[in-house]
């Protein structure tokens, strides 16, 4: 591919998706700080965080109100996605298919030198899909268990009271799991991966280069530009996708 062609930026994310991403990142960060400081309150660092936030009552209030914000973000995301698919004919590009599992196997074979080429992925690869659904499903679980812990008396009217301590265990352990996944998996892929280091700018600009799309999403590349990935083509205008 010609150098001046591959440098052409392609819009990958709508500005609203960028706003949604950073709003979710802000909510997640606040929930982690206020939540884990309560879970590990016996440690000096956690106690210092709680004191900095104004005490345990202020920390709990901030955690709960941030939880409301996170709930609104999650519900609107689900509703917008559902409405887009049902009424605007958006392609459900985050649905996990059999190909995602075979792509994972193909990439493992490639990494171990058993295959000459990596998996050919579409708009989202299997890693992005699994991470996405982890966030969505984990978010719904955190919302449900968080509400149970916030209003235990109300919840106990409709479900057995034994579910309250179960909710506490699920809520705190899922929070720790989500924190570790973001730190180890997401931050690596967005910052430290050799392919994007020192940082992936897609969630700042909403765009990636044609060269990167050709490398990471060859099926989408061919669908957008009508040219098999790997062949030279002329520059094309930016494209906008809904999801």
Image (cartoon, helix red, strand yellow):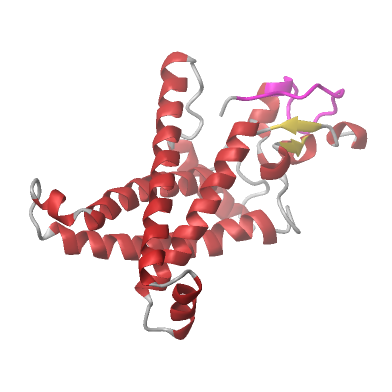
Give the total of numbered labels. 0
Q: Is residue 111 magenta?
A: no
Observer-nearest of 35 and 117: 35
> In this picture, is 121 found above or below 181?
above
> In this picture, is 1 found above or below 225?
below
Residue 220 appears left or right of 26: right
Question: Residue 218, located in which quarter of the rendered image?
Answer: top right
Observer-nearest of 109 and 16: 16
Q: Tell me residue 127's x, y (percent).
A: 53, 48
Residue 186 appears left or right of 158: right
Residue 198 appears left or right of 12: right
Q: Residue at x 17, y 59 (%)?
A: 164
The rendered magenta stretch, by its main secondary structure, is classed as loop
**Residue 208 in sight from this viewpoint:** yes
Q: Residue at x 25, y 65 (%)?
A: 169
Q: Tell me residue 210's x, y (percent).
A: 78, 34
Pick the quarter of the image with the C terminus. top right
Observer-nearest of 34 and 56: 56
**Residue 112 in sight from this viewpoint:** no
Q: Tell me residue 201's x, y (percent).
A: 73, 47
Q: Tell me residue 228's x, y (percent).
A: 73, 26
Q: Which residues are magenta?
A: 224-241
Pick the quarter of the image with the N terminus. top right
Q: Residue at x 49, y 52 (%)?
A: 27
Q: Is residue 237 magenta?
A: yes
Question: Residue 31, located in which quarter of the rendered image?
Answer: bottom left
Q: Residue at x 41, y 69 (%)?
A: 36
């Amino acid at each position: 591919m010609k150098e001046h062609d591959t440098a052409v930026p392609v819009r990958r994310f709508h500005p609203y998706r960028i706003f949604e991403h950073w709003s979710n990142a802000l909510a997640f960060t606040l929930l982690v700080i206020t939540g884990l400081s309560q879970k590990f309150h016996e440690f000096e660092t956690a106690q210092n965080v709680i004191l900095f936030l104004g005490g345990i009552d202020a920390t709990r209030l901030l955690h709960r109100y941030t939880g409301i914000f996170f709930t609104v973000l999650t519900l609107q995301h689900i509703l917008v996605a559902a409405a887009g698919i049902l009424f605007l004919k958006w392609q459900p590009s985050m649905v996990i298919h059999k190909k995602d599992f075979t792509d994972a196997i193909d990439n493992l074979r490639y990494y171990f030198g058993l295959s000459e080429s990596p998996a050919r992925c579409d708009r989202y690869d299997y890693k992005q899909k699994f991470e996405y659904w982890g966030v969505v499903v984990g978010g719904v679980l955190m919302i449900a268990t968080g509400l149970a812990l916030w209003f235990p008396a109300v919840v106990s009217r409709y479900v057995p009271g034994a579910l309250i301590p179960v909710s506490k265990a699920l809520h705190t352990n899922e929070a720790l799991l989500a924190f570790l996944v973001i730190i180890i998996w997401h931050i690596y892929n967005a910052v430290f991966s050799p392919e994007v280091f020192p940082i992936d700018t897609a969630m700042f600009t909403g765009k990636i280069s044609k060269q990167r799309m050709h490398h990471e999403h060859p099926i989408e590349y061919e669908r957008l530009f009508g040219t098999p990935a790997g062949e030279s083509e002329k520059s094309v205008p930016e494209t906008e996708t809904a999801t």
